[in-house]
């Protein structure tokens, strides 16, 4: 098999936040999307960010948490509630790490 055969355009993958506590708080599971393959620069940033450098992690995760059209959910004017942001960050790392 040629390596070039495995290089494809990234696709959106739906992720559901469905922890009991958050479903109870928000009334239903919450969906967002991530790319199934990350561009090399974003993958490198994610792999090298330290968990204690929360600011850098948030900046990176802002680029990775997407809506159904592939646009970032958060920007300078729109921020997720902290509990959802924390759970989304965990889900992004789990998804990208596979």
Image: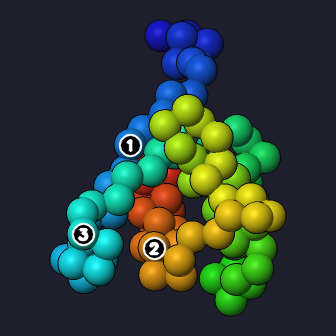
Q: Dot 1: what SS?
A: strand
Q: Is residue 48 visible?
A: no
- At a point 59% along the width and 20% down the height, the residue shown is 9
Q: Mark 2 or mark 3, which is nearer to you? A: 3
Residue that numbered label 3 is attached to: 27
Question: Are the two marked residues, 2 and 3, in contact with CB atoms closer than 8 angstroms?
Answer: no
Instruction: Report x, y in % for residue 23.
Output: 24, 72
Instruction: Assess disc 2: are there few (<14), some (14-19) or many (≥20) residues with their C-alpha within 10 Å of its C-alpha.
Output: some
Label 1 or label 2, whichever comes before in sequence order: 1
Check disc 2 and report its element: helix, strand or loop: helix
Mark number displayed over residue 84: 2
Q: Which mark is residue 54?
A: none
Secondary element type, mark 3: loop
Residue positioned most to the bottom = 52
- The picture places residue 27, in percent across and down from the top left corner, at 24, 69
**Label 1 to label 2, Cα distance in Å?**
15 Å
Mark 2 and mark 3 lie on one chain; the one further toward the N terminus is 3
Which residue corresponds to the image point at 69% horizontal and 72% vertical from the top-left? 57
Q: In the picture, residue 48 is in which quadrant? A: bottom right
Residue 33 vertical position relative to residue 51 in the rendered view, above or below:
above
Q: Is residue 42 above or below residue 37?
A: below
1 vs 2, front mark: 2
The Cα–Cα distance between marks 2 and 3, rounded to whole angstroms, is 13 Å
Please name the residue that numbered disc 1 is placed on: 14
Using a 10 Å C-alpha cutoff, classify the residue at mark 3 as few (fewer than 14 neighbours), some (14 to 19) or many (20 or more): few
Q: Is residue 16 left or right of residue 78?
A: left
Q: Is residue 58 left or right of residue 66?
A: right
> Gap between marks 3 and 1, in whole Å?
19 Å
């Amino acid at each position: 098999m040629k390596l070039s055969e495995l290089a494809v355009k990234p696709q959106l993958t739906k992720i559901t936040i469905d922890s009991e506590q958050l479903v109870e708080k928000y009334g239903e599971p919450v969906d967002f999307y991530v790319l199934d393959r990350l561009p090399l620069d974003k993958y490198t940033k994610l792999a090298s960010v330290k968990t204690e450098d929360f600011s850098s992690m948030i900046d990176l995760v802002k680029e990775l948490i997407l809506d159904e059209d592939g646009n970032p959910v958060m920007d300078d004017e729109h921020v997720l509630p902290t509990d959802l942001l924390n759970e989304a960050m965990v889900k992004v790392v789990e998804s990208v790490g596979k």
